[in-house]
């Protein structure tokens, strides 16, 4: 097994897209099988050495930034993609090593007339990372987040046990939450009492009385196990897709359009505020001058039915004053088209800007109940306007989930953080979540406590203690490592 200790050779594993500083590790290890992962974890548990799991390193909350010890990278478990039909369930499955990149699964699935419908905008994420964060993407509007696609996992616990979990095969409840391992060892998982918000959610551990055990390992941010292998459901490719960028003369009009357009059952519905448009303009694109907001959507149709579908959208364009002649449209498998690249370029430019400024990402990733979403959008815009803080708002508006990125100057960082906390409090008050897809990582502990309170966070820590008694996996992810002392 490859082990790297040279600090120059491991420095790229000490960061992610959050720009969180202070990452360090004594070594990075590159296992090639679940058995090798098991050996590493057994040794680390005995020595009490922290292990931070590394996927593609595209995470947005500092979760893969190590705080000492060992970086366990899955990048050498990136070859196997086995696509097959599961006749008993009537679905297509891709069984993959956890280090396989999203883009490689996409290519392989497409070559077989299938597609992986749920993935983050960033295609260099590894599948294990997307499961560990319960990532979602533009098409989650139609298909749901990663959790909905995970059919089976092979995971390695910190004591070295290798566990294969198939969805539907093991449920845990307050009455019976004992998991018996192959070795005969029993683990009692303390089912928490906090209630998850009824919106798209990736904040802390999934918890419900009677839940499927597999769901505990989706969205756990490398704190409960190392995911070695994932089985993901694939979909049949839509026959035709048309995608469109439409421009609006006011942000409010685009918000209303996005919600009414849901009746036309789009695949995706993404938002760009005025500041995001200005960013796109810097790429020399021909965007109408009146544009204060844009919506990007994709609609799938049966072969030969695209013209009919476009008519329905035309009518809606008229209602909201989106000029058809200014809209950009594309017919084909939009996924590989320029629009997806444009959508991706916004977070890319935001992250580059944060890196240049040398500050940590200050972003809100809340999803809201649909009826409270307009109130939240108004609150974002009014508060940021009053505070005179530079910002960009974009994202999954169809799911009432936008990313608010605050881009402060040095002297404004404290004010920006205080405002971000106000946003989080308001989202919780309105029944929303503090993280719909990025997770909590190391930079949003305070947000998680806003959602579930101190006791809720302690309940999560107790789950970790049960599964990772040596407390070596992903320390400081989701909640502070020092919580271990309070249990
Ligand atoms: C430009 C850009 C756009 C993005 N857009 C989106 C988006 O639309 N939606 C979205 O959800 N996210 C988005 N992200 C964030 C990011 O891509 C996702 O969070 C992604 O799921 C992270 O995967 P990764 O492999 O890069 O994970 P990493 O950053 O390597 O790790 C993330 C977390 O997962 C853990 N982990 C990784 N692999 C494993 C494993 N095998 N076993 C156990 N734990 C593991 C790590 O320890 C860490 O806690 C975007 C990021 C960028 C840079």
Image (cartoon, rainbow, N blue to C red):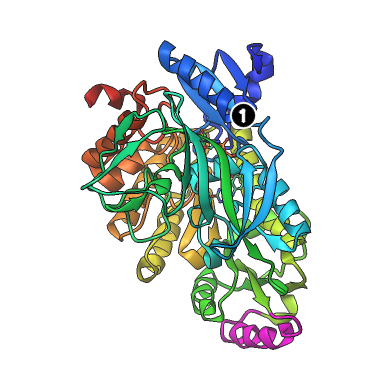
Mark 1 — residue?
A: 33
In this view, the residue in front, 101 or 209, is 209
- The kind of secondary structure the magenta stretch mainly shows is helix
In this view, the residue in front, 160 or 88, is 88
Q: Position of residue 302 (x, y in %)?
A: 70, 80
Residue 313 located within the stretch drawn in magenta: yes
Disc 1 is placed on an element classified as loop
Q: Position of residue 402 (x, y in %)?
A: 49, 58
Considering the image in quadrants, where does the N terminus appear?
A: top right
Which residues fall within the magenta stretch? 302-322
In percent of the image, x 45 and y 19: which residue is there?
50
The answer to whether residue 282 of the structure is visible from this angle is no
Q: Is residue 407 shown left or right of residue 373?
A: right
Report ligand 1 position as a quadrant.
top right
Q: Position of residue 456 (x, y in %)?
A: 25, 42
The answer to whether residue 83 of the structure is visible from this angle is yes
Q: Quadrant of residue 426?
A: bottom left
Q: Quadrant of residue 34?
A: top right
Q: Position of residue 420 (x, y in %)?
A: 40, 46
Q: Is residue 240 shown left or right of residue 377?
A: right
| Above or below for 160 versus 103 | above
In percent of the image, x 65 and y 27: which residue is there?
32
Considering the image in quadrants, where does the C terminus appear?
A: top left
Q: Is residue 7 shown left or right of residue 134?
A: right
Q: Is residue 467 shown left or right of residue 131?
A: left
Q: Quadrant of residue 140?
A: bottom right
Residue 450 located within the stretch drawn in magenta: no
In this view, the residue in front, 119 or 416, is 119
In percent of the image, x 29 and y 27: which residue is there?
483
Are there few (<14), some (14-19), or many (20+) residues within 10 Å of tag 1? some
| Above or below for 241 versus 73 | below
In percent of the image, x 51 and y 56: which residue is there?
145
């Amino acid at each position: 097994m490859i082990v790297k200790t040279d600090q120059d050779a491991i420095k790229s594993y000490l960061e992610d897209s959050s720009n969180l500083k202070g990452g360090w590790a004594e070594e990075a290890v590159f296992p090639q099988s679940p058995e090798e992962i098991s050996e590493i974890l057994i040794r680390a548990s005995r020595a009490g050495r922290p292990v931070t799991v590394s996927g593609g390193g595209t995470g947005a909350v500092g979760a893969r930034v190590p705080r000492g010890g060992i970086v366990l990278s899955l990048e050498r478990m990136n070859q196997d993609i086995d696509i097959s039909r599961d006749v008993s369930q009537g679905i297509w499955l891709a069984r993959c090593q956890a280090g396989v990149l999203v883009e490689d699964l996409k290519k392989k699935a497409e070559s077989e007339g299938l597609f992986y419908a749920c993935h983050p905008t960033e295609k260099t994420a590894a599948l294990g990372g997307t499961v560990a964060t319960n990532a979602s993407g533009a098409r989650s509007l139609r298909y749901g987040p990663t959790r909905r696609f995970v059919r089976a996992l092979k995971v390695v616990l910190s004591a070295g046990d290798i566990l294969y979990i198939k969805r539907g095969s093991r449920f845990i409840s307050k009455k019976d939450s004992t998991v018996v391992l192959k070795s005969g060892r029993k683990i009692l998982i303390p089912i928490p009492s906090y209630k998850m918000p009824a919106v798209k959610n990736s904040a802390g551990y999934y918890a419900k009385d009677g839940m499927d055990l597999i769901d505990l390992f989706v969205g756990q941010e490398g704190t409960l196990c190392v995911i070695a292998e994932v089985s993901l459901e694939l979909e049949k490719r839509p026959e035709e897709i048309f995608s469109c960028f439409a421009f609006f003369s006011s942000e409010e009009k685009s918000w209303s359009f996005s919600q009414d357009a849901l009746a036309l059952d789009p695949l995706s519905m993404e938002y760009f505020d005025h500041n995001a448009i200005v960013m796109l303009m810097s790429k020399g694109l021909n965007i109408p001058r009146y544009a204060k907001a844009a919506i990007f959507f994709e609609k799938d149709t049966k072969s030969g039915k695209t013209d009919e579908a476009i008519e329905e959208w035309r009518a809606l364009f008229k209602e909201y004053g989106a000029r058809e002649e200014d809209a950009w449209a594309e017919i084909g498998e939009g996924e590989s088209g320029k629009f997806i690249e444009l959508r991706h370029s916004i977070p890319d430019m935001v992250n580059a800007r944060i890196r240049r400024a040398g500050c940590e990402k200050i972003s809100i990733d809340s999803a809201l109940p649909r009826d409270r979403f307009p109130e939240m959008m108004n609150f974002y815009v009014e508060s940021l306007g009053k505070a005179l803080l530079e910002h960009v708002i974009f994202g999954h508006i169809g799911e009432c989930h936008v990313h608010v990125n605050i881009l402060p100057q040095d002297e404004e960082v404290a004010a920006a953080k205080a405002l971000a906390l106000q946003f989080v409090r308001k989202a919780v008050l309105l029944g929303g979540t503090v993280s719909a897809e990025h997770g909590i990582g190391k930079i949003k502990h305070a947000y998680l406590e806003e959602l579930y309170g101190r006791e809720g966070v302690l309940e999560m820590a107790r789950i970790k203690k049960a599964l990772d008694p040596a407390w070596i996996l992903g320390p400081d992810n989701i909640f502070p490592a020092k919580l271990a002392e309070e249990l």
